[in-house]
Amino acid sequence: MDKKIRYTDHRVIISEIPRMYNQILERLLEKRDLETVLYLRMMMETGIRCRDLCELNDSNIKGREIKISALKDGMEYHDFEGKYPKISKRTAQIARIVFRDGVCFSGTQQGYMFRIRKCCDNPEFHPYLLRRYYMHIMLLRAYKKGVLITSRRLFWGDIQ
């Protein structure tokens, strides 16, 4: 039986998230909305909070690594091995096209969320599920390497 990720009152099967992500990505590309495509890809590839992505600027991107502190508590994003989140080569190419004059995302968090949700057929999908999915994958990787995460806060959690 597939596990389910809970987001408020929504229930979505974990194995369905990549399919929904690809569906949304295709629709956004059809509309040629590269800024939202980049926002969506960065959410899926890095697990960075939606609000923090809106604050991203050129100085936070070193090659393919994203070095940014969370607005929620000021701590930097990193995985259980202490590595910063990385974006794919394709996402880095899109970022070079979209980012202009040091400004990364010109829209609001609510605007990106609206455009992303509008492109998904499943009414129970919420963009924050991409972050939860990323965290689920990271926990599985840590488990496979024999690392015990003792805190729910994956990026900053205590590691034993």
Image: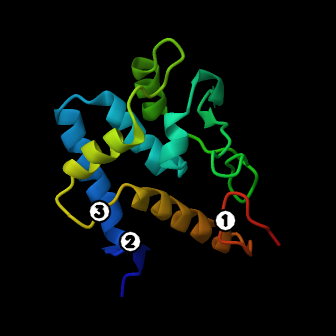
Q: Which mark is residue 153?
A: 1
Residue with the mark numbered 3:
125
Quarter of the picture containing the N terminus is bottom left
Q: Nearer the viewer, residue 157 or 140?
A: 157
Name the residue at the top extreme. Answer: 101
The residue at 41%/81% (across/down) is 3
Q: CA distance from mark 3 to mark 2?
A: 11 Å
Compared to 138, does 46 lie above or below?
above
Which numbered disc, 3 or 2, marks the residue that appears first in the sequence?
2
Q: Position of residue 79 (x, y in %)?
A: 68, 55
Q: Is residue 149 above or below residue 30?
A: below
Q: Is residue 61 above or below residue 150?
A: above
User: Do the CB atoms of the residues marked 3 and 2 lie less than 8 Å apart?
Assistant: no
Task: Find numbered disc 1 in the image and state the secondary structure of the residue it sits on.
Answer: loop
Does 86 sit left or right of 8 as displayed?
right
Where is residue 104? Give x, y as percent: 48, 25
Closer-to-camera residue (127/72): 72
Query: From this viewpoint, which residue is outermost toward the bottom?
Result: 1
Helix, strand or loop for disc 3: loop
Identify whether 41 is placed above or below 138.
Answer: above
Label placed on residue 14: 2
What amino acid is labelled 1 in the image?
Arg
Amino acid at dot 3:
Phe
The residue located at (32%, 39%) in the rendering is 111
